[in-house]
Image (cartoon, grey):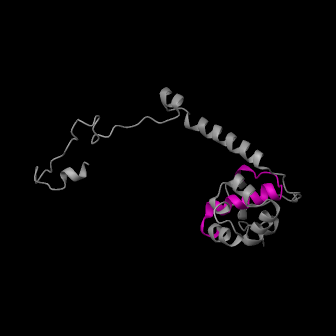
Amino acid sequence: MENEINYKSNPLHGVSLKTMLTELVDHYGFEILYAYLYINCFKTNASIVSSVNFLNKTDWARENVEGFYLYQFKSLPRASAEQFLLPPRDRVIPAGQVPGAPAVLSLEDAEKLRAKRAMKADGFRSGPGRSTAAKRSGNSPKRENKYESKTRDEPVKTSTHPIWGDADPWANAKNK
């Protein structure tokens, strides 16, 4: 009994995905939702029905939309570290916290947020363990493929089968 979730302290309790998405679209519109969440169902053939179908099938997208609903639309304070590990529908909102007015969002702010996230991701990509050349270029070093020729004139290395030797009809096809 102690491990049961107190759903009554979660603003998502009793709110269907369709209701939540309708509220979000009525307030922000599909363009803002796409700009902030970057989920393609809000851009391509955007409608409530198609978005609900996609979100019902895709857990990560549904959790992103539920988190957006809680923390942008309902303006609740961010979840604690242990609550953040749970899906939004399982999170418990502490007593005394009530939903506030929806956050004011714009496409310009979404672009700034996307640029900030890209810079943060680049910082992770160039973290410890990468060569300095890879850090400067932003690319990982390429591995050489032993079957690719370095120049067009150089023949591709072929292998011989241990049993058939050069009579293997597929030996050259495998290496092309």
How would you classify the magenta stretch by its main secondary structure? helix
Residue 67 location (% of width, % of height) = 73, 58
Residue 162 lies, with reference to residue 116, above or below; the image says below
Q: Where is residue 9 in the image (x, y as percent from the top left)?
A: 82, 65
At a point 37% along the width and 37% down the height, the residue shown is 143
| Residue drawn at point x = 77 percent, y = 68 percent | 22
Say whether residue 74 is left or right of residue 148.
right
The reply, left or right, for residue 128 in relation to residue 50 is left
| Location of residue 73 (image quadrant) | bottom right
Highlighted magenta segment, given as a residue range: 56-82
- Residue placed at 69% from the left, 56% from the top? 34
Residue 153: image x %, image y %?
23, 35
Where is residue 88, by image quadrant? bottom right
Q: Indicate whether 150 appears above or below 27.
A: above
At 60% from the left and 65% from the top, the residue drawn is: 58
Q: Where is residue 64 in the image (x, y as percent from the top left)?
A: 68, 58
Residue 16 seen in the figure:
no
Q: Quadrant of the N terminus?
A: bottom right
Note whether 84 is above or below 155 in the view shown: below
Residue 144 drawn in magenta? no
